[in-house]
Amino acid sequence: MARSGSSIGIPASMVLALIAIAAPGFLVHRTRFGSHLQAIGASRALAVLSGLAINRTIVLSYLVAAAATVAAVTLLARGSGNSPGSEEPLLLEMVLATLIGAAFSRRRTVTVWGALLGVVLVTALSTGFALLQVNIFWVSGIKGGLILMVLIAAALDERLHR
């Protein structure tokens, strides 16, 4: 990495973001551990019947999730710790991105690629509002309204498929 925080013209944060998306996607969809994890998530009882080591897989999944603290530490370091209240809009964006990602999946579950799509859409929305200089309170209200719309659409979809 160069002194400017980029390598071959690609910002270091972009490289970290690509790794943060590609690594879990590969882990869940291309490894034996990922297939065991998906089997346990789909039906714990069937996973027990098939002889999977459920407790070990669950513990490993928590360890993998704990490794994600590197991303959190990077995000906190970026803010230098001197911006109180900056986490609240990020939490709202995280919830919205996750719900949008789940809404675009076939089974209405959270997936790595759905979360990535949600992040891209929410980032585009936030950037657009910032460029239009929309008041942050209106932006938060709109994002909250979008969360409610996604939840209502999911509930209606669930009722229609019963």
Image (cartoon, rainbow, N blue to C red):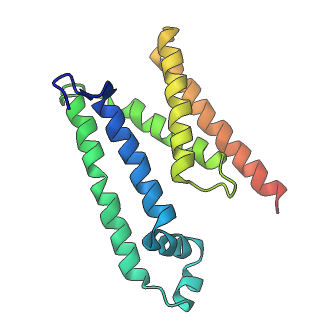
Residue sitting at the far front: 8
Q: Quadrant of residue 18?
A: top left
Image x and y of residue 108, in percent? 66, 54
Instruction: Name the residue located 36 percent from the left edge and 46 percent from the top edge.
Output: 19
Q: Position of residue 53 (x, y in %)?
A: 42, 85
Is the residue 8 above or below the residue 64 in the image? above
Q: Is residue 76 left or right of residue 59?
A: left
Left or right, residue 82 beside residue 25 = left
Q: Is residue 81 above or below residue 95?
A: above
8 is higher (above) or lower (below) than 150: above
Would you identify the image quadrant in which residue 73 lies? top left
Q: Is residue 118 above or below residue 110?
A: above
The N terminus - image quarter: top left
Residue 96 visible from this viewpoint: no
Query: x, y percentage for residue 27?
Result: 43, 62
Kindly identify the residue that appears in the image at 43 percent across and 47 percent down.
21
Q: Nearer the viewer, residue 141 or 1?
A: 1
- Relative to residue 141, is residue 148 drawn left or right? right
Residue found at x 59% / y 77%: 43
- Closer-to-camera residue (34/101): 34
On the question of residue 127 being in view, the answer is: yes
Q: Which residue is painted at 82% across and 63% down in the image?
A: 162
Q: Residue 44 at what x, y percent from top left?
A: 54, 80
> In the depicted view, which residue is nearer to us: 17 or 105?
17
